[in-house]
Amino acid sequence: MTACLPGLYAGKISQFGIKFIGSFTERMAAFYADEPLPDLGFREHGYLYCVSPKGVDAAKERVELQRGLGAHTIFLDPGPLKDRFPWLNVDDLGGGAWGSRDEGWFDSMGLLNGLRRAARCSGIEYIDNAVIGLDVDRCRVTAAHLATGERIECGTFVNAAGPRAQQVRDMAGLSIPVAPFKRYSFVFASCTPIPGRMPNMIDLSGTFVRPERELFLTGNTPLDNGPAGYDDFKICHDEFEDRIWPALWHRIPAFDALKVRQCWTGHYEYNMLDHNGIVGFHPDISNFMFANGFSGHGLQQSPAVGRAVAELIVDGAFQTLELSPFRFERIPLNEPFLEEAVI
């Protein structure tokens, strides 16, 4: 397995996603009649990965791979990087890799609500309940038991439970290395505005920051990084004071006077084997499908993964994108599908 192979698949998945997002309003038109169509508010500012002097060669290889796949990523040496983003401290950088087009962020709830509406209009029934048990007979899931006492028979069972994937897995006597990992998010105001179209900047420290209208959103990989309790959403305010703010101030000197306006804790559905998703049927329980472990990339990869799951159910094989390297079989073989530059 070459180091570039996971990056190739990630690039194809992301390209599918950006096309889906770009055509989302058109796709939803039939489900909204005379009502206003959903707007995902796509901010095409790109992601800017800061690169250390020692990491320049590897970063340039990744950029060339992405450009070869049709992405608009460019590598900027320190001088041009400073010219384009004058608010950035480049003194200790070897450069930066920036997605100049077809890259950014959008309204995740707008996407969810639009897809949910389209599904309901197409005859899909949503049940507001909790699965507490599964019936497994002759290597198939035959039914799901709900918290209200109901029993629902099933033809195909898809585990898309996010950070609670292990709880659902346990009901079928299966095992995947996916657990909830806490991530702290902070929205802050700055006394000094940042001019121009600020990208989502990822610092050498792993801290990221991007604009959120007149405010900014930031986070990092916290010191207490590890499996968390399913209901543990306690936030660590010291993470901002002791680690995030110093990193931001070093990289963006204008961030010398900040005030946190809002903060929360979320959970990554973290794949502890290789930080990549698990997509496909279990080899022994033939109708149990995994769509788990995306480790923070789930929103970005969801259009492609949703299509892949549908194709496996309907056609029995991947059709649009070949996602076989993400299938469950790599887990018991302990064959990680590793990707470089994961945040």
Image: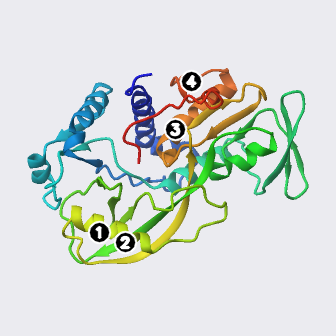
Residue type beneath disc 3 = Asp
> Crowdedness of circle 4 by 10 Å Cα count: few (<14), some, many (20+)?
some
Mark 4 and mark 1 lie on one chain; the one further toward the N terminus is 1
- Asked whether the viewer can see residue 282, the reply is yes
Q: Is residue 259 above or below residue 296?
A: below
What element does badge 1 sit on?
Answer: helix
Q: Nearer the viewer, residue 50 or 99?
A: 50
State yes or no: discs 1 and 2 in contact (Cβ < 8 Å): yes
Q: Which residue is mark 2?
A: 242
Q: Which residue is mark 3?
A: 274
Q: What separation in Å lies between label 3 and label 2 (alpha carbons)?
A: 29 Å
Q: What separation in Å lies between label 1 and label 2 (alpha carbons)?
A: 7 Å
Residue 176 in picture, x, y percent from top left: 67, 40
Residue sitting at x 20%, y 74%: 192
Dot label at residue 246: 1
State yes or no: discs 4 and 3 in contact (Cβ < 8 Å): no
> Crowdedness of circle 1 by 10 Å Cα count: few (<14), some, many (20+)?
some
Mark 3 and mark 2 lie on one chain; the one further toward the N terminus is 2
Camera-nearest label, 4 or 2: 2
